[in-house]
Image (cartoon, grey):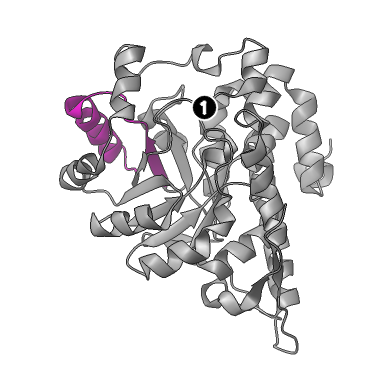
């Protein structure tokens, strides 16, 4: 039987295998966006707005892709983003993704919207974990959940702030498909839906302050899409600014995250680390984000496709191929270390669609 490395030598092969393995409903859930899907398309299209300025004759025989995130070592500046309902794509879901990330020397971000309890994922993981918090209850509910993830050994807490109302994902709506009602365990002890929706819609910076007082974990705010909010993150003591438009799944016509990185990096000015997701599907995309000021990139859809194609091995293969593409891009642009990549490596060429 062919190995996963033999079966998949390109990322496109993995994507095609994932689509073949999934029902139309599951494929659209994993791959779709909000309303007209303009934001979804912009996430990818905006990558072409930046080109490299390659340097030559710089001895790139030794390449270093290692870095750190919040003090945690990474073999590559690529992590697996938090995604809900991964059991719809593969029976092992988040367990497989956590194993894949650890196998490749990186971090898995676990969503609150998971079938598995955090302790189960921590037991299966072979690398560090970060927890993505969807705040659906009161302070007592949030504190009880935080204490569980602290005790389970998670290394960071990411507050999701870009979902005050669930986006209209018309691929799902037209199929009358609700992934949130497909049998996830409710270990989270969610309150009634209306109460949870009201609570997440009522979040303010005061809740960020409460989190800083309540948890000993580094605090990440996920879903930042403006320079002004990035500055507020720093003012409120946030350890990491996570630039994201939720993969184009929440607000149609949201800005493409790659186009926000440089301005947010300038505003943050090293006072917090920066990560980004949204449309990153090639090694060249990742190198551009590093050049513009990100510490690392989180991948969502690409990892989900790897999971659907071949479980933990498929997700690990996605990371392996992205790592290979990153190394090739580094060598061909004259970069020897991801930690020394700077803005001189890229040039913006077009702001048009």
| Image spot of residue 260 (x, y percent) | 52, 58
Q: Is residue 352 above or below residue 55?
A: above
Residue 23 forms part of the magenta stretch? no
Q: Quadrant of residue 75?
A: bottom right
What residue would you read off at disc 1?
167
Question: From this viewpoint, which residue is outermost toward the bottom?
Answer: 57
| Image spot of residue 124 (x, y percent) | 46, 35
Q: Quadrant of the N terminus?
A: top right
Question: From this viewpoint, which residue is outermost toward the front?
Answer: 352
49 or 276, nearer to the observer: 49
Measuring 62% from the left and 32% from the top, which residue is drawn there? 33
Residue 123 visible at all: yes
| Image spot of residue 174 (x, y percent) | 67, 14
Q: Is residue 68 above or below residue 318?
A: below
Measuring 41% from the left and 35% from the top, which residue is drawn there? 123
Measuring 54% from the left and 55% from the top, which residue is drawn there? 297
Residue range highlighted in magenta: 129-154
Secondary structure of the residue carrying numbered label 1: loop
**Crowd around label 1: few <14 · some 14–19 · many ≥20 (10 Å):** some
């Amino acid at each position: 039987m062919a190995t996963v490395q033999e079966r998949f030598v390109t990322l496109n092969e993995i994507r095609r295998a994932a689509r073949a393995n999934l029902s139309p409903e599951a494929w659209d859930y994993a791959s779709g966006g909000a309303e007209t899907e303009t934001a979804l398309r912009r996430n990818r299209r905006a990558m072409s707005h930046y080109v490299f300025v390659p340097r030559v004759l710089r001895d790139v025989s030794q390449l270093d892709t290692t870095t750190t995130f919040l003090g945690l070592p990474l073999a590559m500046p690529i992590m697996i983003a938090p995604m809900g309902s991964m059991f719809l794509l593969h029976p092992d879901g988040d367990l497989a993704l956590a194993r894949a990330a650890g196998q490749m020397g990186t971090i898995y971000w676990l969503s609150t919207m998971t079938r598995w309890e955090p302790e189960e994922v921590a037991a299966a993981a072979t690398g560090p974990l970060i927890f993505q918090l969807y705040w659906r209850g009161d302070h007592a509910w949030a504190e009880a959940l935080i204490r569980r993830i602290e005790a389970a050994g998670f290394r960071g807490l990411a507050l999701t702030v870009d979902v005050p109302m669930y986006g209209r994902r018309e691929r799902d709506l037209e199929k009358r498909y609700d992934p949130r009602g497909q049998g996830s365990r409710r270990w989270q002890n969610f309150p009634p839906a209306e109460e949870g929706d009201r609570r997440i819609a009522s979040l303010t910076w005061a809740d960020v302050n409460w989190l800083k007082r309540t948890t000993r974990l580094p605090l990440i705010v996920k879903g930042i899409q403006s320079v002004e909010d990035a500055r507020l993150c720093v003012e409120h003591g946030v350890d990491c600014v996570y630039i994201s438009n939720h993969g184009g799944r929440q607000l149609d016509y949201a800005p493409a995250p790659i186009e926000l990185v440089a301005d947010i990096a300038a505003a943050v000015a090293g006072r917090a680390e920066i990560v980004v997701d949204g449309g990153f599907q090639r090694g060249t995309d990742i190198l551009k984000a590093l050049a513009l000021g990100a510490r690392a990139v989180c991948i969502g859809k690409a990892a989900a496709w790897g999971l659907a194609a071949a479980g933990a091995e498929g997700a690990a293969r996605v990371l392996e191929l992205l790592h290979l593409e990153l190394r090739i891009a580094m060598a061909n642009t004259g970069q020897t270390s991801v930690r020394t990549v700077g803005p001189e490596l890229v040039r913006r060429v077009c702001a048009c669609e």
